[in-house]
Image (tube, rainbow, N blue to C red):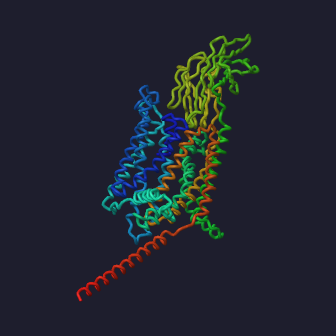
Amino acid sequence: MRAVLVLYFRYFLRWDDDLATSIYHAFVAMCYLTPILGAIVADSWLGKFKTIIYLSIVYAIGQVVMAISAIHDITDTDRDGTPDNMTFHVSLSMVGLFLIALGTGGIKPCVAAFGGDQFKGHQEKQRRTFFSVFYLCINAGSLLSTIITPILRAQECGIHSQQKCYPLAFGVPAALMVVALVVFIVGSGMYYKAEPQGNIMLDVCKCIGFAISNRFRHRSPQYPKKQHWMDWAEDKYDKLLIAQIKMVLKVLFLYIPLPMFWTLFDQKGSRWTLQATTMDGTFGQLVIQPDQMQTVNPILILTLVPIMDSVIYPLIRKCGLNFTPLKRMTVGMFLAAMAFVCAAVVQIEIDKTLPTFPSASQSQLKLVNMGSNPLTVTLPHNNPVQLAAAQASENYFVFEDKIIRVSAGSPAVSVILPLGMGRRQTLLIPSNISNSWVLTKDLFAKPEEGNNAIRFINGMNTAVNVSTTGTQFGIIPPSFPSQYSLIRNGKAIFTIHNGAQSCEYSREFGFGSSFTLLIPSSFTFGPDCQTSITEIEDIKANSVHMALQIPQYFLITAGEVVFSVTGLEFSYSQAPSNMKAVLQAGWLFTVAIGNFIVLIVAELGRIPEQWAEYILFASLLVAVCVIFSIMAHFYTYMDPAEIEAQFKKRDDEDKEIEIVKKNSIKLHDEDNVKQTKM
């Protein structure tokens, strides 16, 4: 569902790029905060099985609510394809996202653990196989979703008007979630359901809280200092628990720089998807949707994980290099930073192809000669412009005056034009320059979602009707333009007719262009009418290919494999046996914090150039990478099992000493009794 979420915000709810990015990352952050709540509920109250069922129901309801929120016909009273009550759709979608975050976060810590519970102690091999299949299924699902969901979104559906089918894109996952839940419940009788044993996270929090409060109570110099501040909890808590918490805190301290990696990593679903909307997605006969580029990530994961484990790491070991887990994580962070440098380079190339739109204090004007004879036009602060018959000026002219005088022809005919500041306009000069001149409003932004904005100008003396599949331009009066219509990429065939005659005009369109198609005064219906149409390119099509995003996806995925997989492995190796869940919660918390950082930068930073924002994130991660490498240098690897065994051995020895003492006291008491009797 996340594959299309940022485009839903951008193009259905009509939010700008920054707000769409902010809400997207706020949602992702919530998805990684709620697992802590889910773990506590499962371990302390409901158990894993019931938690999965109840929160999966919440999850499915959230998906259904999202699907309903995307139905534009609910509030589209005037049937123009645009919702009239956007507040309703925004409110409904926020409720849906909250329920989804609660559901997905709640079941996230339970599903894998519940699967692991089904295996007994002697089934270690089978358990490992299960987790491998489980991880494979997650990535297979991710791969399928990033292919299929954008295809569903790209369909057009609706009751009264056809629009992008976001209800289908959200509704199919909702239906699949319901099916999955039913299948899970049907197997209830086959599961081993462990009873809730209490949540270790609560015990850890209580112990840490007691240590801090006890230290605060004994802060005066008269009390002796302790080796570690957690030792202040010895008055109430077991020494083994305190030692385990110390080990966890040591690892959690290393987690402090990690959110910066997730800050960059999760932007592949927001900023990078928006970047892809300004690119050309044609791969031969195949057309890739902007949100389908995320497919590269799961494909590379499924490829790189076995390559890293079977080839790269063994090769590094054979070279005699000590490539420790923390060193791997440092490399992963650096690769992610390089991915954003690549994204910045791609963005610079995209910016070179974008048109220069007028600022708030400027206006831009294009001239169109609809006549069959050449025309000379005089504009203020410019040389006279020569316009061929049925042609337009090559570029837009820039003015800072709100009102200008334009003259054309011989003898000259002058008109006073009021220009709109911050806008683009086109002046239509009729074949008879004594007739009224028409000033049209042009697009002053790239067409959305990679569509092409097309309009027709009727230079004939009679009205014409223009239509194409799914789009009606309507009846166009003489010397007037039609409204813009959005046409998808590919070949479009337009039918032009005047009631008695008709002809077809066809053209291939790319992504994100804008064309004004002039039907000249000399236009004649017939088989050659195709050549009579004058094509005026107002905005060039996207020319930077989506394939240029592949290097940044490769680097960010390589960074994920080296960083994320290694990080989890390192955390588990350094965590006590009963503290795995605590470190898992800490790891997920770093993901949430990383997404909050994106939210803050997007809302408060407001950096005007997107490439500069990419460079800022890359620079921050490099700085954090240096700090992390220093922290890693001073980190001492532990063997939690050995430390726990030492404490248990001490406890056993203490118990033996206590038993000996009790026995000696008992013998002494018996001697006293005998003496008393004597």
Direction bottom: furthest residue: 678
Residue 573 visible in rendering: yes
Left or right for 447, reference 407: left
| The C terminus, quarter of image | bottom left
Q: Taking 432 as reference, is 206 above or below it?
A: below
User: Residue at the spot x=59%, y=52% of the render?
Assistant: 556
Left or right for 54, reference 319: left
Residue 522 occupies which quadrant of the picture? top right
Total marks shown come to: 0
Q: Taking 264 as reference, is 388 above or below it?
A: above
Q: Nearer the viewer, residue 39 or 413?
A: 39
Q: Nearer the viewer, residue 616 or 370?
A: 616
What x and y, as percent, mark residue 427? 65, 20
User: Residue at the spot x=45%, y=64% of the render?
Assistant: 242
User: Residue at the spot x=41%, y=73% of the render?
Assistant: 651
Residue 150 visible in rendering: no
Q: Taking 652 as reference, is 113 above or below it?
A: above
Direction right: furthest residue: 383
Left or right for 202, reference 283: left
What x and y, as percent, mark residue 72? 43, 33
Q: Nearer the viewer, residue 302 or 263?
A: 263
What x and y, as percent, mark residue 104? 42, 50
What x and y, as percent, mark residue 307? 58, 62
Q: Taking 415 as reference, is 193 above or below it?
A: below
